[in-house]
């Protein structure tokens, strides 16, 4: 009985030595995957906030710049694409298109001094600027979470555990090339 008990204890110890790192690695990957999902949700929240502000900004500008219909159509189209985007790359592309259209709208504003002095426009501009900052922080947080997750699933022995349990790379939130060109907007003129 003593020999059998010793054999069982050795087998149990070997099992625990093997199982504990697997369980720990799996749990870490699950936690990091959840952080990526939360960060993606935060981007969506901020993009929605911005998308909700833009119609008010457009309506304010429309009152002054009725002949600028093309830009209003582009903004509406870009908002629709962003609302329909499902994947991070699709969201990044739609976000870039919307940002570009809003930037063009803000450049148009330069031609309307009365609009720039409107309290409603100034309030909306400040709210939009704050939202843009939140969007940027959310993107950074998302990419940091993705980097932590992707690095963890690629390291040994986690790469084996990731392969067994189906953990795969997450895409980074990348700006399109057009988004890398910052338009110059100056509301002080």
Image (cartoon, rainbow, N blue to C red):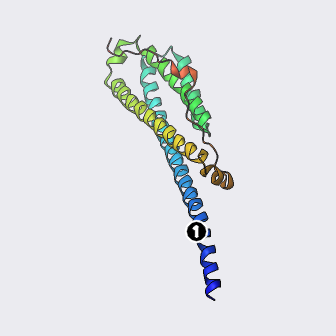
Quarter of the picture holding the N terminus: bottom right
Which residue in the structure is indicated by mark 1? Answer: 16
x and y, in percent, of residue 159 in the image:
63, 49
x and y, in percent, of residue 105 in the image:
47, 19
Nearer to us in this view, 166 or 107: 166
Other residues around mark 1 within 10 Å, as few (<14) / some (14–19) / many (≥20): few
Quarter of the picture holding the C terminus: top left
In the picture as drawn, the residue positioned furthest to the bottom comes out as: 1
Instruction: Using the image, determine if residue 115 lies above or below residue 54.
Output: above
Instruction: Using the image, determine if residue 128 lies above or below residue 44.
Output: above
Instruction: Using the image, determine if residue 175 lies above or below residue 66.
Output: below
x and y, in percent, of residue 22 in the image:
59, 60
Q: Residue at x 48, y 16 (%)?
A: 66
Q: Is mark 1 on a helix, strand or loop?
A: helix
130 left or right of 35?
Answer: left
Instruction: Name which quarter of the figure residue 25 lies in.
Output: bottom right
């Amino acid at each position: 009985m003593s020999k059998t008990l010793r054999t069982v204890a050795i087998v149990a110890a070997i099992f625990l030595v093997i199982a504990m790192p697997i369980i720990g690695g799996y749990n870490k990957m699950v936690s990091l995957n959840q952080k990526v999902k939360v960060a993606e949700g935060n981007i969506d929240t901020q993009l929605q906030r911005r998308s909700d502000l833009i119609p008010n900004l457009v309506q304010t500008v429309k009152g002054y710049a009725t002949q600028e219909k093309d830009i209003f159509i582009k903004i509406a189209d870009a908002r629709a694409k962003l609302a329909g985007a499902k994947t991070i790359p699709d969201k990044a592309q739609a976000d870039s298109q919307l940002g570009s259209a809003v930037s063009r709208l803000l450049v148009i504003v330069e031609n309307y001094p009365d609009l720039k002095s409107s309290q409603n426009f100034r309030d909306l501009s400040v709210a939009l600027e704050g939202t843009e900052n939140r969007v940027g922080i959310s993107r950074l947080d998302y990419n940091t979470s993705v980097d932590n997750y992707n690095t963890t699933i690629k390291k040994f022995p986690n790469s084996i555990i990731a392969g067994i349990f189906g953990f795969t790379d997450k895409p980074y939130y990348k700006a399109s090339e057009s988004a890398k060109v910052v338009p110059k907007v100056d509301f002080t003129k």
